[in-house]
Image: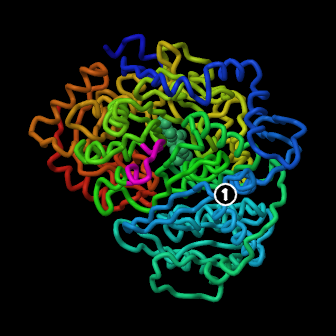
Amino acid sequence: MADNAPESQETLSNLLQETRRFAPPAELAAAANITADAYEQAAADRLGFWEQAADRLTWSRKWDTTLEWNPPFAKWFVGGQLNVAYNCVDRHVEAGNGDKVAYYWEGEPEGDSRTITYADLQREVNRAANALQELGVRKGDRVAIYMPMIPELPISLLACARIGAIHSVVFGGFSASALQSRIEDADAKLVITADGGYRRGNPSALKPTVDEAVANTPNVEKVLVVRRTNQEIAVNDRDVFWEDVVAKQSDQHEAQPHDAEDPLYILYTSGTTGKPKGILHTTGGYLTQTAWTHHAVFDLKPETDIYWCTADIGWVTGHSYIVYGPLANGATSVIYEGTPDTPHRGRFWEIVQKYKVTILYTAPTAIRTFMKWGDDIPAKFDMSSLRVLGSVGEPINPEAYVWYREHIGASKTPVVDTWWQTETGAIMISPLPGISHAKPGAAMKPLPGIVADVVDDQGNSVPNGGGGFLVVKEPWPSMLRTIWGDDQRYIDTYWSRFENMYFPGDGAKKDEDGDLWLLGRVDDVMLVSGHNISTTEVESALVSHPKVAEAAVVGATDPVTGQAIVSFVILRGNAEESDDIGAELRNHVAKTLGPIAKPRQILVVPELPKTRSGKIMRRLLRDVAENRSIGDVTTLADSTVMNLISEKLPSAKSED
Ligand code: 6R9
């Protein structure tokens, strides 16, 4: 492709061709929860479709109006009332399923596990709800939660939901200043935490971070502490202990109904720059869409499935697909406290084998790590129970998708690549496992009831084969309602780029069949010789080389091409770093995507910079590629990674 090719006018180049297709297994398709007519039904009557989804919940008062839409402010199921905790817990007990397991909890130290039935969960949530009320927490108050992945974490969320308090979970890996700013922004009056949790084989303290954060937040009245690790901790006047305050409470608590539009939670999302945004979710629409999508996308059969989402509850994936969606559906889930390599690199597969997990939901970053560790590790475990695999968090490279299907899913399980965001609350674009003829790397189609498209910079829909900006054109039940305390920022961030369309900030393309492929954040798009090239396509081309496990690419200023592609790659466990690896990989990309996408430079690195939720931070790599001092690293999960990368620089394989 030459520089003056007509493609240079397009919004986002479409370079990657992928022809592999995976039909749904016949058995799964025959018994699938959702059939193809759902798309037609929802297209004909979108609100009617969501009403039916809402009818899967138990309402104390039926809504009067399905949707009130004053762009960009939506209200769903107006006038309806329900209690989220009742829907997630009590109604299953009342239906005779009290003995059914809600959570198999697996601590990181081996042998440390708990089985929690729906009846157990009901008692625990009731005690915690009574305790919150005794501590002075009332409907509408904010409660900050900073905890490891222990059962008291979902119990705390549900206790808040039960009494109508608004929880704000802050991931346990965040610093004291990050926690403090989130406590202040939401003006939380209670913090729930633990002494610590287990991480990589050792107790890792949380309480000292809370102490530091609340030293400067006078509005926090109490800190409620769970003892998990029994580490020695300082005890302050504000501290009260779960074992004292919660354990003594009655296990009875009457759930009051809340309005469908009462706030359920705030969850802060940092984005790439600026002050974190407090994403606000409300009650009825959020539970409707998380529950329906969990039922549809994973084909959940609550009687027989064992479902495991490996995310942390500190992220939206954990909120929607460990707590609210699965519990509303009466599912049996696994919760794991620790890391995938403790005490050995087969820990995930050991857990799948132990609990006979049938549905597994994890992230591309984890899948690529498993690829790097080698095929022989999962091969040692019996994972024949698995029947549906899911992916979320980043674009999944086709090669990682195929590896996941083959080595984890025994070449038979469908893989659902689910696109959504903290802001969308629930899955928006995804294959359905009983219907879609899935393409590796494609999120395929908006779910029934979701209207999404790819547009050019004028907001016009691009034709099939074209790339551009992903947008959502109609409101959806679990959409964010605003940014906490900042309606203007909500309008500016999501609704100002295109008129009357929600702009999530992601690039995407439509293939010849009109199926959707996510192409990463538009901020990361590289402009090479007049072509807008997505990071995702080049990274996927690199990962399709047998020696590469993981790749990140960035555009660096270049005197000839405007920007040039600089690639950072991690090799697979069994691959040797040879002298000509740079040339080999550059040629491989040129062959796969065309010469326009040929990287200028390949750097073999031991690690990539990632956020605490596992997303690659290309911004820092751009600093390296342009020989700048490295910018703000506070959102980096492991601050030593940039040193490791810088150390590799002198041996960098730079060609041309
Ligand atoms: C659920 C979650 C949202 C951003 C989103 C996009 C990326 C998530 C993806 C995906 C391609 C997928 N993302 N899932 N990109 N394919 N299947 O991750 O929420 O932490 O708010 O991140 O993650 O860039 O805009 P959140």
Q: Nearer the viewer, residue 11 or 99?
A: 99
State the SS at label 1: loop
Q: Is residue 507 above or below residue 76?
A: above
Q: Nearer the viewer, residue 235 or 649?
A: 235
Residue situated furthest left in the rendering: 579
Picture residue at 31% right of the left edge, 14% below the top: 1
Write down the residue under mark 1: 98
Location of residue 405 (image quadrant): top left
Picture residue at 40% right of the left edge, 22% below the top: 530
Location of residue 93 (image quadrant): bottom right
Q: Nearer the viewer, residue 257 or 179?
A: 257
Q: Report if residue 250 lies within the magenta region.
A: no
Q: Is residue 244 above or below residue 312?
A: below
Which image quadrant: the C terminus? top left
Q: Report if residue 360 lies within the magenta region.
A: yes
Instruction: Determine if residue 156 is in view.
Output: yes
Residue 218, position as x, y percentages in the image? 68, 79
Picture residue at 68% right of the left edge, 76% below the top: 220
Residue 556, position as x, y percentages in the image? 33, 38
**Magenta part of the protein: which range?**
351-363
Count of numbered circles in the view: 1
Location of residue 596 (image quadrant): top left
Q: Is residue 120 above or below residue 65?
A: below
Q: Is residue 642 left or right of residue 352?
A: left
